[in-house]
Image (cartoon, helix red, strand yellow):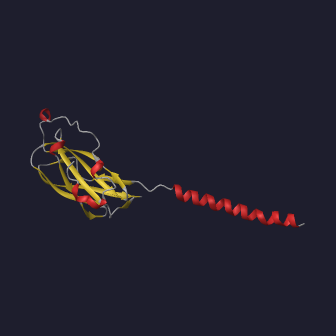
């Protein structure tokens, strides 16, 4: 009689233990939502002052606390002579920086974005004015960059990585 009682009592505990374990596993494997960066600067520009801008979102919501949004701009084929300008939050997840193009040409731009523990860097081609396409150099630079000096691990030295 006593044995029979024990087994009845034990069943609910077993069921409970099982479902609790499943819940914990689900919570642990949930990945953080991807940070998305969309460049807002038009592909066709005119010589002179323009605004470089990119909008940062996560789960379709504006990210207003990005660690860093840097715009790397260079003329096609001359990435080594490119410039890095820091974007600042203007509105609703949009980070922007002023930039001046002083001559017609084909340019490229990366929006190097570090936010919520991720690094995202969309690239865009920019056509400024009416460049003589026969004189435009081919851009052979790689689609990546040396991130060794602006990785997630160097939060303390954010301002020392302008050299790439
Ligand atoms: Cu980058």
Q: Residue furthest left?
A: 102
Report x, y in % for residue 103: 9, 45
Report x, y in % for residue 122: 30, 48
- Considering depth in this image, is 111 or 142 the residue closer to the camera? 142
Above-or-below relation of 80 to 49: above
Q: Residue furthest top?
A: 134
Above-or-below relation of 91 to 135: below
Q: Is residue 123 left or right of residue 79?
A: right
Say which residue appears at 37% left-offset and 57% top-offset: 117
Report x, y in % for residue 65: 32, 64
| Picture quarter with the N terminus | bottom right
Q: Quadrant of residue 129?
A: top left
Report x, y in % for residue 34: 41, 54
Q: Is residue 98 left or right of residue 114?
A: left
The number of callouts visible is 0
Above-or-below relation of 80 to 89: above
- Considering depth in this image, is 128 or 97 the residue closer to the camera? 97
Q: Quadrant of residue 86?
A: bottom left
Q: Residue furthest right?
A: 1
Say which residue appears at 25% left-offset and 46% top-offset: 124
Say which residue appears at 52% left-offset and 55% top-offset: 29
């Amino acid at each position: 009689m006593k044995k029979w009682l024990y087994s009845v009592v034990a069943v609910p505990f077993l069921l409970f233990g099982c479902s609790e374990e499943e819940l914990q596993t689900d919570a642990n494997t949930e990945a953080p939502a991807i940070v998305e960066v969309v460049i807002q600067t038009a592909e066709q520009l005119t010589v002179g002052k323009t605004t470089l801008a990119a909008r940062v979102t996560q789960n379709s919501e504006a990210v207003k606390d990005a660690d860093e949004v840097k715009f790397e701009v260079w003329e096609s084929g001359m990435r080594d002579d490119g410039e890095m300008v820091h974007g600042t939050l203007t509105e609703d997840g949009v980070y922007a920086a002023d930039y001046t193009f002083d001559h017609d040409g084909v340019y490229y731009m990366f929006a190097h974005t570090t936010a919520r523990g991720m690094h995202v860097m969309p690239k865009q081609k920019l056509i400024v004015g009416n460049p003589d396409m026969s004189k435009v150099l081919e851009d052979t630079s790689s689609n990546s960059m040396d991130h060794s000096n602006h990785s997630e691990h160097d939060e303390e030295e954010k301002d020392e990585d302008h050299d790439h």
